[in-house]
Amino acid sequence: GDSVTQTEGLVTLTEGLPVMLNCTYQSTYSPFLFWYVQHLNEAPKLLLKSFTDNKRPEHQGFHATLHKSSSSFHLQKSSAQLSDSALYYCALRGYQGGRALIFGTGTTVSVSP
Amino acid sequence: DAGVTQTPRHEVAEKGQTIILKCEPVSGHNDLFWYRQTKIQGLELLSYFRSKSLMEDGGAFKDRFKAEMLNSSFSTLKIQPTEPKDSAVYLCASKTGGGAETLYFGSGTRLTVL
């Protein structure tokens, strides 16, 4: 069935360094992928989502490219900020049954000065 | 506009008790979701409603978990009976119907089962 895999549970890095979070998926049909971010004591919220026309989505300095050949939608940012410390979820819109989003297990990012 | 409202924010239950969590979606949203959030499993789908009809039920949660949508602006999640392994954050989310649209989450209910 459809699924999302995030291999890193925790990523720690220093402010100013690049960050990349891995996301791979299995999808029965043409996929829609999303990244959600959850800051401490807040609700998850959408960070960015894939497009059908191969545009690269960007938001708050983050970007992700959907690669259907490798079934990936990795999240990247060239220079991490302290405020990027949060929990990041990759999600796939499922086609089995209804259309609920299928989430990965999440990656916690901790940025230090 | 009001976002997704969940009550209570915290709930403590004894093993075997019945608890009911509440959710009010964003006004006008047709789709409502219940997810369980844990560090190990991430976000797991419990139930998905579209226009009050149950569209999807998380297979692993069918026996003791029951979500209902009493009207378009109110949903409940009942856990009966509770077990310590149910300790988690329960998130409600809503969205408009259609394609690759945004999910709006509530702040969640943190459940602790003793």
Image (spheres, rainbow, N blue to C red):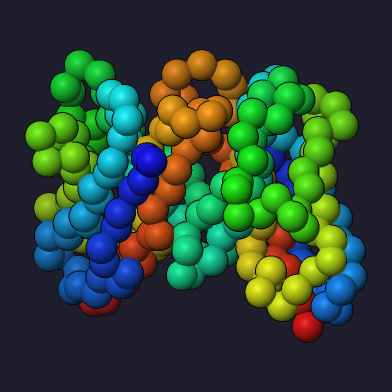
| Residue at the spot 18% in from the left edge and 40% down from the top edge | A71
Residue B111 drawn at (x, y percent): 73, 68
**Does residue B10 appear to the left or right of A52 in the view shown?**
right
| Label total for image | 0
Q: Quadrant of the C terminus of chain A?
A: bottom left
- In this rendering, position of residue A58 left or right of residue A18: right
Q: Residue at x 74, y 55 (%)?
A: B63
Reply above or below: B44 against A100.
Answer: below
Seen at 80% across and 69% down, the residue is B82
Above or below — where is A18 with respect to A10?
above
Residue A10 appears left or right of B25: left
The residue drawn where x is 12% and y is 41% is A70
Query: B51 or B7, which lies in front?
Result: B51
Q: Nearer the viewer, residue A21 or B84?
A: B84
In the figure, residue B105 lies in which quadrant?
A: top right
B24 and A7: which is toward the camera: A7
- Percent across and percent down for residue B13 are 84, 74
**Residue B26 at x, y percent in the picture:** 69, 31
- Residue B1 visible at all: no
* Front in this rendered view, residue B2 or B76: B76
Residue B58 seen anywhere in this rendered image of the structure: yes
Q: Position of residue B69 (x, y in %)?
A: 81, 33
| Residue furthest bottom as drawn | B114
Quadrant showing the N terminus of chain A: top left
